[in-house]
């Protein structure tokens, strides 16, 4: 028995070394060949051990032929199954390869692997499909951002060209001495410069929010008090436009506090209120509502009477440069600060940037008479 065990171990090691050499030799070939080699190696080792036992007369000739025929049929079965398995894996690998090549050239849905493939390759196919969806979404966002940038550049060029032309005309008139009301001309130039400065400030603020700077020091901010302050600051603007501006808060002494930067939050609410006043016709009403939601978050809503936004435009309301005005002229388009004059459609984009930097959400819905802009912030 020790002799048989030793010979069997010896032949197993010899065949294992030969199989390893074969696997190394065909390592760069098709996976089907390596599977066939790995399947036949144990059978070859058993066959070699039996032949050695026959030659050493450890078993009879009759028994040896039985064992040899058994091994032969087992080898044929192993060869057939290894070929079939190799075919499945090779077909699945080629299908995955096609999907990878398709993923590098387009973002269309990937072609199915087809047939039956091992679970590992099927899981890899699912991962590729998820990656495709992420890349497609990222590509769509990139295209949208690029379109938004081009639109913003076009809008800014348009919005700056007219006031610059006006400044040039007034300055040339002063140089030529054809303007009699010099103090009035200087006031007009200063007002135009102030409006242009406000637009540059908006661009700077939007750039700062887009580059995700380190968060400023946060403190407890009462949205109730902030809404009342913003309403007071915009009261004169609302009266000049013939719009009634009101603030609605819940009864009690709840300050409706959130953790945030008071200046940034004030700017966001001011942009929303100023936007609502500008788009509400004379005799309409703008309401600023502050309340606490069931989940503890604080909601500030600005509801106007603008008549509503087309459903197709709702997803674009907070895009950079988007503006619902049909005429883009400095005389008809106020700035985001609420003053009449030029504006780049940056107010809502800035408001979204501020709210998202405070881990909140902002959205807009149509109402019976206009729109309602809602910003939800975590309670402080």
Image (cartoon, rainbow, N blue to C red):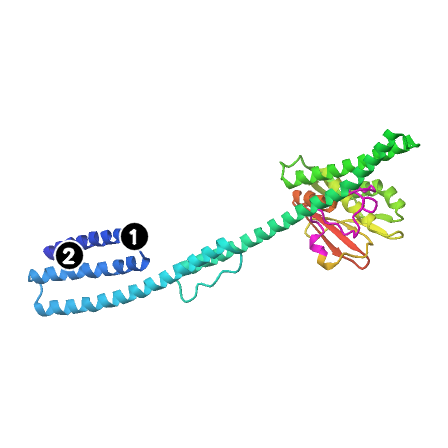
Q: Mark 2 or mark 1: which is in front?
A: 1
Residue 333 lies, in percent from the top left, at 80, 46
Whichever of labels 2 and 1 marks the residue nearer the N terminus, that label is 2
State which quadrant residue 220 falls in. Answer: top right
Residue 346 visible somewhere in the drawing:
no
Residue at the left extreme, as displayed:
57
* Distance in Å between CA atoms under marks 2 and 1: 28 Å
Quarter of the figure that contains the N terminus = bottom left
Residue 38 lies, in percent from the top left, at 26, 58
Q: Which residues are magenta?
A: 313-342
The residue indicated by pointer 1 is: 27
**Tag 2 and tag 1, C-beta contact below 8 Å:** no
| 333 falls in the magenta region | yes
For this view, does 363 lie left or right of residue 249? Answer: left
Quarter of the figure that contains the C terminus = top right
For this view, does 91 lie left or right of residue 188? Answer: left
Q: Dot 1, crowdedness within 10 Å: few (<14), some or many (≥20)?
A: few
| 38 falls in the magenta region | no
Residue at the (80%, 60%) spot, across then down: 368
Q: Main secondary structure of the magenta part?
A: loop
Residue 296 lies, in percent from the top left, at 69, 49
Rendered image: mark on residue 8: 2
Residue at the (87%, 33%) spot, across then down: 173
State which quadrant residue 153 falls in. Answer: top right
Residue 94 or 44: which is nearer the viewer?
94
Residue at the (77%, 41%) spot, across then down: 161
Rendered image: mark on residue 280: none
């Amino acid at each position: 028995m020790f002799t048989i065990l030793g010979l069997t171990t010896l032949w197993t090691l010899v065949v294992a070394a030969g199989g390893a050499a074969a696997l190394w030799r065909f390592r760069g070939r098709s996976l089907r060949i390596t599977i066939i080699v790995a399947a036949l190696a144990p059978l070859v080792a058993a066959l070699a051990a039996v032949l050695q036992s026959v030659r050493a007369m450890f078993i009879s000739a009759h028994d040896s032929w039985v064992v040899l025929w058994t091994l032969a049929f087992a080898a044929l079965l192993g060869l057939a199954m290894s070929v079939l398995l190799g075919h499945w894996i090779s077909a699945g690998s080629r299908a995955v390869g096609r999907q990878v090549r398709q993923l590098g050239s387009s973002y269309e849905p990937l072609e199915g692997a087809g047939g039956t493939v091992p679970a590992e390759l099927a899981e890899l196919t699912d991962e590729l499909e998820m990656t495709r969806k992420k890349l497609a979404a990222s590509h769509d966002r990139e295209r949208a951002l690029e379109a938004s940038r081009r639109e913003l550049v076009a809008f800014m060029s348009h919005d700056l060209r007219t006031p610059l032309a006006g400044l040039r005309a007034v300055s040339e008139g002063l140089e030529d001495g054809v303007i009699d009301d010099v103090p009035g001309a200087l006031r007009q130039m200063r007002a135009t410069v102030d409006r242009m400065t406000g637009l540059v400030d908006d661009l700077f603020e939007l750039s700062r929010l887009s580059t995700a700077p380190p968060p400023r020091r946060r403190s407890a901010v009462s949205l109730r008090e902030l809404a009342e302050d913003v309403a007071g600051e915009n009261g004169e603007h609302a009266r000049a436009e013939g719009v009634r501006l009101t603030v609605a808060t819940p009864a009690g002494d709840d300050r409706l506090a959130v953790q945030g930067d008071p200046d940034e939050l004030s700017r966001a609410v001011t942009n929303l209120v100023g936007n609502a006043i500008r788009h509400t016709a004379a005799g309409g009403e703008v309401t600023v509502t502050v309340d606490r939601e069931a989940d503890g978050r604080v909601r500030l809503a600005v509801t106007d009477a603008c008549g509503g936004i087309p459903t197709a435009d709702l997803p674009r309301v907070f895009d950079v440069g988007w503006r619902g005005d049909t005429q883009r002229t400095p005389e008809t388009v106020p700035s985001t600060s609420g003053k009449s004059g030029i504006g780049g459609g940056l107010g809502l984009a800035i408001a979204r940037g501020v709210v998202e930097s405070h881990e909140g959400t902002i959205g807009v819905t149509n109402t019976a008479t206009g729109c309602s802009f809602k910003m939800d912030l975590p309670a402080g």
